[in-house]
């Protein structure tokens, strides 16, 4: 089945420029102790606070006293690192279609010279994807707190689902966008392998603060009709991230049976994913799917799991380091929306050599995200949790 809807219940919208609120974090009793490769760690979680339908969490830099939590309802809040102070800095709910897999789906910050820009991935009132760019003040507030900013690119969506949502800034300071295959089910128009469509692709662009964008040097299909394309053959790349080596990690939501994680290593000049084909919809994970589709040189995932044990939809994506997850640097962390679990894997670049369950009973996990210093788990019930990792 397709990804379960993220929006639950009625939406309560908070106005921009509100007085910061304070609350105390809540520790949980659940702990998990695991041993792998001769290193034992203990996992626990601390609830930092709540926000309606959290789906993303990002920071500008590790030296910033704030991080930013994204609500699918169209709200961005600025939180202190301990979660005690929260302030709404952006409200684009009036220009966003919300419900099911639509809404404000992703946020990334990009620094150009000495100025911070925010890149938003959302569905507009007509349900189509808009990537927009907004100016951010030095204190982290948005210059226009009720505007999504200037339009960078608009991509028509033929169905209501599979809108992707991932937007990240790469180590080259270019913007990478995960686009779903257009929706319905089974890639009905076979768009993921269709080079005339931006759907079912990962895009790489260089946005302008005034709107629009240019095609960066190195895009592999720069002479084609769709020069924005960086990688092809994805179904619904909800979350993706780069590791310190420039490897692009993609958590791609599956169709009927298989969820997958693909690691795309960097080359000598460019970050990971350049010209890669992740195989959908010729394959779901490593398994043949649409027999009439050909995926040339498809890259196999480093990890896949089926829909047993109540699992249904992968919710990535974060890479651990010696600060966020001591004893688990280089491990990839992801959740499952239906099972309410978080799992970590270690790979050798082509296959998985370590796997452990990190936490469970988390409700509907919408994302696992990491800043430079901390890892977080977001759930559809509104909870934002810090993952605490202690190395024994």
Image: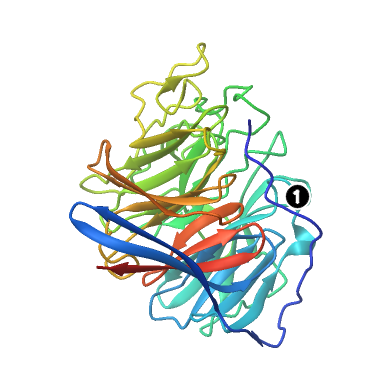
Colour convention: rainbow
Front-most of 239 and 195? 239
Residue corresponding to mark 1: 99
- Residue 66 on image: x %, y %: 50, 79
Give residue 209's quadrant in the image. Answer: bottom right
Give residue 41's quadrant in the image. Answer: bottom left
Image label count: 1
- Residue 170 on image: x %, y %: 38, 56
| 356 left or right of 309 in image | left
Viewport quadrant of the N terminus: top right
Front-most of 67 and 37? 37
- Vertical relation: 384 (above or below) 272: below
- Vertical relation: 390 (above or below) 306: below
Viewport quadrant of the C terminus: bottom left
Residue extending furthest toward the right: 10
- Vertical relation: 369 (above or below) 143: above
Residue 172 in sight in this render: no
Identify the residue at image location x=55%, y=50%: 340
Give residue 49's quadrant in the image. Answer: bottom right
Residue 313 in sight in this render: yes
- Residue 329 on image: x %, y %: 27, 60
Other-residue count near label 1 (Cα within 10 Å), few / some / many at <14 / 14–19 / ≥20: some
Residue extending furthest toward the left: 38
- Residue 231 on image: x %, y %: 42, 37
Identify the residue at image location x=49%, y=25%: 193
Residue extending furthest toward the front: 29
Give the structural element (helix, strand or loop) at label 1. Answer: loop
Identify the residue at image location x=65%, y=57%: 380
């Amino acid at each position: 089945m397709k990804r379960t809807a993220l929006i639950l219940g009625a939406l309560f919208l908070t106005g921009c420029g509100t007085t910061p609120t304070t609350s105390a974090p809540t520790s949980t009793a659940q702990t998990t102790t695991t041993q792998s490769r001769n290193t034992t760690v203990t996992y626990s979680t601390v609830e930092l606070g709540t926000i309606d339908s959290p789906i993303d969490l990002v920071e500008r830099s590790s030296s910033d006293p704030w991080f930013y939590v994204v609500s699918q309802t169209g709200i961005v809040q600025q939180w202190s690192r301990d979660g005690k102070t929260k302030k709404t800095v952006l409200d684009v709910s009036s220009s966003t279609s919300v419900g099911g897999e639509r809404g404000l789906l992703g946020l990334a910050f990009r620094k150009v010279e000495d100025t911070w820009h925010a890149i938003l991935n959302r569905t507009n009132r007509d349900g189509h994807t808009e990537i927009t760019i907004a100016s951010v003040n030095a204190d982290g507030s948005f210059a226009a707190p009720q505007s999504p900013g200037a339009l960078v690119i608009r991509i028509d969506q033929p169905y209501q689902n599979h809108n992707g949502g991932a937007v990240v800034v790469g180590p080259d300071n270019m913007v990478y966008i995960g686009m779903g295959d257009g929706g319905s089910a089974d890639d009905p128009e076979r768009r993921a392998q269709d080079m005339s469509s931006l759907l079912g692709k990962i895009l790489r662009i260089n946005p302008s603060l005034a709107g629009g964008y240019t095609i960066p040097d190195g895009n592999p299909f720069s002479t084609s009709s769709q020069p924005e394309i960086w990688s092809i053959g994805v179904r619904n790349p909800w979350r993706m991230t780069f590791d310190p080596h420039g490897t692009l990690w993609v958590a791609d939501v599956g169709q009927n049976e298989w969820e997958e994680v693909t690691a795309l290593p960097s080359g000598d000049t460019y970050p990971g994913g350049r010209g890669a084909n992740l195989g959908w919809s010729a394959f779901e994970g490593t398994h043949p799917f649409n027999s009439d589709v050909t995926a040339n040189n498809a890259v196999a995932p480093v990890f896949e799991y089926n829909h047993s044990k109540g699992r249904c939809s992968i919710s990535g994506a974060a890479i651990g380091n010696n600060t966020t997850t001591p004893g688990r640097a280089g491990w990839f962390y992801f959740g499952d929306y239906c099972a309410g679990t978080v799992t970590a894997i270690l790979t050798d670049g082509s296959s998985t050599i370590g796997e452990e369950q990190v936490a469970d009973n988390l409700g509907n996990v919408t994302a696992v995200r990491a800043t430079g210093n901390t890892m977080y788990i977001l759930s559809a019930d509104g909870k934002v949790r810090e993952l605490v990792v202690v190395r024994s």
